[in-house]
Image (spheres, rainbow, N blue to C red):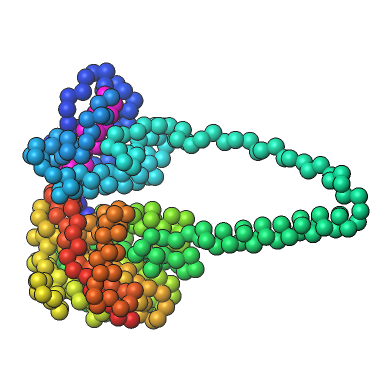
Amino acid sequence: MFPAQTMSDAPKPLGNPASGFRTDARWHLVERILLTVPFQKSVNLHALFSYLAEQSIQSKAEGLTERQIGIAVFGKPADYSPTEDSAVRVHVRQLRLRLHEYFAQDGRSETLRVDIPKGSYALEFHTPGSELSPRQGPAPVRRLEPALAAHTRVKEAVFWLAIAAATICGIGWYRTAHTIARPQAPWPLNAVIKPERQTRVVVSDSSLMLRLLSDQQTTLNEYLQPEYRKNLIPPHLPGNVNRLMDYVSDSQLTSFADLTAISTLMKLAGTLNSHIVLTSARYLDQRDLEQGNLVFVGGPTSNPWVGLFADKLNFQEVEQSVGGRMYFLNRNPLPGEQKQYEGLVSTGSSGEDYATISVLPGQMGQGNVMILQGLRQEGTEALSALLADASDRDRLEKAVHQNANLTSPYFEALVRSRAVAGAPVSVDIVAVRSIQP
């Protein structure tokens, strides 16, 4: 959940478009998108989309280089190195994701669409379906003329035997090709998203913010008690406050970072996304742990189920006090590593945050488990950005396989992100560990 933003605080588009520019239907589409919550929440995304739209619509796309965008939108110095500072690339990836989400939800009925083609920073506007090639009619059927030379039964038998052999070979080729083309999610999601199993994505329970009222830390056993959330609400509250607390307690709420993670998982799953089932941590049943694969989003303070796997993890999330200091405890530091990795003071601030991505075997020996947990929402959102980018996934895979102690397919990785005004702008891999079955 995020604080409301007043109109005076809302980000505004860059530049000063001419009146003709303002009447362009493409600009009207951009303005509608800029009014949605993701762009009102993120000043950086608002400014980036405004700038790219302004330059693209006014036919100035040739100037949209990574360096120029960094200088114009993010205030980078003229001599900054885009190879060392990935802020532009990270935000453009996030912008592509937000545009995809808009046209899948609020903008479903739009008659004009916009996206950012890979390898370019210029916006591309098109009507739905216009990017597809026109459908061609079926190719004419070629009829085989009878073989004039087949005068004898022997030659006819040879001819039909050849046809039968070709048919059998064709069927075998089709089955082989169909098997080879079997859909598969990219690494490391292929450990938990598989054609033969269901994947249950368990998102965090934002009603756990009620802990701030009672200053109580949470165990899984306490969380599973029927009256747990009600017991967190102090008695004798004013009527309107009590109604608000009841609403938070009874509603299925989750964070924006969790929604970003869901969107990334669904996109990377491709045709396998029909195997994904979403569940709130509140309604997960212990029997669900016995079958299929699981993805837990959030740490133990927002998704207590993660505590089941704490003994298998080297990097353990610690909350020093309810709503207070949070850090990852490095149980067995290697040379050059820290004993603790502390994140942001609070969600929405700027600085470094930490997160872990873990893949480990399920509790009951059935399926695998992935855990995506950040100290703050920025850390969890940074994991989504990492998984969404093929080069970042390759970086992670290389780091995992270069670990000298890696003797199993299961691992955990500590990731550091740099956040500006609540949005992650860079992702680095700090440490990797092997997890034994």
Residue 107, can we see it?
A: yes
Q: x and y percent of residue 323 in the render?
A: 12, 65
Identified at 66% across, 38% down, the residue is 139
Say above or below: 164 vs 282: above
Q: In front: 193, or 338?
A: 338
Disc tally is 0
Q: x and y percent of residue 113 in the render?
A: 38, 35
Identified at 78% across, 43% down, the residue is 144
55 in magenta:
yes
Say above or below: 23 vs 366: above
Going by the image, does 167 lie left or right of 212?
right
Q: Quadrant of the N terminus?
A: bottom left
For the magenta stretch, what is the residue range?
43-58
Q: x and y percent of residue 114 in the render?
A: 35, 35
Identified at 20% across, 39% down, the residue is 66
Kindly report the secondary structure that dominates the magenta region of the rendered protein: helix
- The quarter of the picture where residue 7 lies is top left
